[in-house]
Image (cartoon, rainbow, N blue to C red):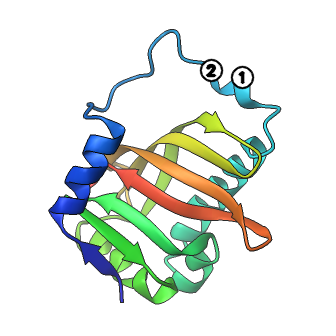
Amino acid sequence: MAKTVGKLAIGALALAFGACASTAAPASAPTDAAFAACPAYAPAYQVTDDFMRTFNTKDAVQYGAVFHFPSVRIASGNVTIINGPQDLESGFTRLGEQGWDRSDWAKRQVVQCGPTKAHMLTTFVRYRADGSVLSQFDSLYIVEFKNNRWGLTARSSFAP
């Protein structure tokens, strides 16, 4: 069962990371290509490719294989701890009720990178079955090498 942490934890995270709006990176920020030689660069793209591919299957077990558990999701004013694939199932139902059929990346950019971890800014789009856009949100994904494999450890988005 996913555990949701209260708004106090979100406030602490906001203080730690600084308050900011969803905006483009400053002109002085390094481009994604600046990290191409980083050991975590290619795995960050592979993990997020796998994330989107398995998310669109609507199969929690396949989707869950992309994650390191516990995993953290920060969205909707809450911090949610995801302990396993069983905690991912309800998201498919909730999104389906909103008219969601599939999602895709509109943008991805590695903004910090090291030997065992990458931080990636993303924009994802949710689509209806007819191909029309349901919604679009900016987010941050954290990909790490742990337990002898690359996986998704945490994500924070402006999605509800």
Residue at 49% from the left image edge and 77% from the top image edge: 58
As displayed, is residue 44 above or below residue 160?
above
In the picture, the disc for residue 149 is none
Q: Is residue 58 visible?
A: yes
- For marks 1 and 2, give the CA distance: 5 Å
In the picture, the disc for residue 31 is 2
- Where in the figure is residue 54, as x and y percent of width and height? 59, 70
Residue at 49% from the left image edge and 41% from the top image edge: 122
In the rendered structure, which amino acid carries the disc numbered 2?
Thr
- Where in the figure is residue 114, as x and y percent of width and height? 71, 42
91 horizontally vs 11: left or right: right
Q: Quadrant of residue 138?
A: top left
- Where in the figure is residue 88, as x and y percent of width and height? 43, 79
As displayed, is residue 54 above or below residue 138?
below
Residue at 63% from the left image edge and 70% from the top image edge: 66
As displayed, is residue 56 above or below residue 111?
below
Question: Dot 2 surroundings within 10 Å: few (below 14), some, or many (20 or more)?
Answer: few
Determine contact: label 1, label 2, CB under 8 Å. Answer: yes
Could you tell me which secondary element the residue under label 1 belongs to?
Answer: helix
Residue at 34% from the left image edge and 82% from the top image edge: 90
Question: Dot 1 surroundings within 10 Å: few (below 14), some, or many (20 or more)?
Answer: some
- Where in the figure is residue 159, as x and y percent of width and height? 29, 53
Q: Is residue 160 visible?
A: no
For the C terminus, the quadrant is: bottom left
In the picture, the disc for residue 34 is 1
For the N terminus, the quadrant is: bottom left
